[in-house]
Image (cartoon, rainbow, N blue to C red):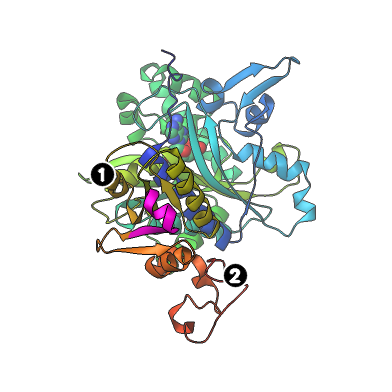
Amino acid sequence: MIQNPKGTHDIFGSEMTIYQAIRELYINICNSYGFKEIILPIFESSNLFQRGVGESSDVVRKEMYTFLDKGGRSITLRPEFTAGIIRSFIQNKMYANEELPVKLFYHGPTFRYERPQSGRYRQFHQLGVECVGLNSYLLDSEIIALGYDFLVNLGLKDIVTLKINTLGDEETRNNYRNALKEYFANYIDKMCDDCKSRYELNPLRILDCKIKEDQELIKNAPKISDYLSEKSKDRFNKLVAYLDELGIPYAIDESLVRGLDYYSETVFEFHVKNNDEIDIGAIGAGGHYSSLVKELDGPDMHGVGFSFGAERLISVVKDNSEKLGLNFDDQLAVYIMPLGNDKVREEALSIAIALRQSGIPSQICYEEVKINNMFKRAERKNALIGIIIGEDEIKKEEVQVKNLSTKEQIAVSYESLVDTLFEMLPHDDCHCHDHDDCCCSDENESEVGESEKCCCHHHK
Ligand code: AMP
């Protein structure tokens, strides 16, 4: 049997329901913050990531899916979104044609050839934002606020921690890099092979090492706070003071350096704790970048962004749904149960199509099973209303409509079916509360009759 490639996975069933809810919430929040969606190619020229993400990052050194296409071009499946967004920002001259900062959001698959383990895949999905064109601690704050708002709205407020740090400006990082080189020079023989090359390429990366022996050495390494330039210190102080003002809790973590080379000044990660209060790792991360746009041949402009891992969000939401009272169960308005042959099922399908056209989600039981089994299926689908139809009903041009929670059952003519169902279905199912003049919202019920603006299909 053909299996999926190592490190990939299928998202379906209850996980897909959660992912859809996460995506919908994410899109709504991004829209409310004034971000516009962008869809980028899944693959780009390899040199975009080599130059953008950085030669010293693990992502570029070890994890890229790179191949030559049939035209002999070196292509890479995107290992992250930021470089692609900046490529598009420059290529489409967004910096000149649009108001700054340009605010973009995205979601989609990402590829890294990593060692597969729990929460770590070779194809995973990210949801993120980039805000490009201006440099201000306020934009860093707004991005952090967006990420935090998203997690709060997902119901994760009580288990999420925001870790934050500053990598300072170029002057800071140059001084700090030298201090780290001096310190680690004494221990180079004891360090892992990866850290030996990190020492040469970018000693800041050593602070990211997860190997226990190296972590012991890292504990006593120089701290970045001792090397911050006055400007960077002031920028960071303003940022954290403003987060205090916004009521966003955070913990400053000086070992936070992030795995991609382009970051400067603010960096942050959102972590979650499991039931034993143990940090199970980052579900989202991001930061500010000062020179990425310029390095990719664009204007001298800054940006800030973050990215959440969809698979990690799905598993956190799934694991905590009971504890946090989260409910992502699907609900179905109508389940139609035809009793008889294909002619009856044909009629059931025609009714389902008519109901769907009126905005009432409906499904049919196609399998020939006993009526008790059909009701069990309706229950498993969280259906609110069951419709039973057989040959007798077809002759009379009516159906049996059963409220599946109260168990009340009535005969309803074809003609009045849509109106009866609208009366029976909770108004929450109807999205027309957005419209002031819709008679489905209680306040206006007596005042308004027919309205063309209403999307609930209650009104013609
Ligand atoms: P990064 O682009 O490395 O800053 O990662 C941003 C987020 O993407 C992380 O916080 C994770 O939630 C997620 N992520 C990164 N790598 C993987 C992976 N291999 N598998 C699943 N999720 C990942």
Residue 223 place in picture, x, y as percent: 41, 42
| First in sequence: mark 1 vs mark 2 | 1
Query: Which of the labelled discs sits on residue 167, or is there none?
Result: none
Q: CA distance from mark 1 to mark 2?
A: 50 Å
From the image, tell me which residue sits under label 2: 460
Q: Residue furthest top?
A: 1
Q: Classify mark 1: helix, strand or loop.
A: loop
From the image, tell me which residue sits under label 1: 274
| Depicted 48 relative to depicted 128: above or below | above
Span shown in magenta: 389-401
CB at disc 1 and ligand 1 closer than 8 Å: no
Q: Is residue 400 magenta?
A: yes
Residue at image position (39%, 54%) is 393
- Residue type, mark 2 in image: Lys
Residue 340 place in picture, x, y as percent: 37, 41
Residue 316 place in picture, x, y as percent: 33, 44
Residue 234 visible in the displayed image: no
Residue at image position (64%, 27%) is 50
Residue 110 place in picture, x, y as percent: 54, 33
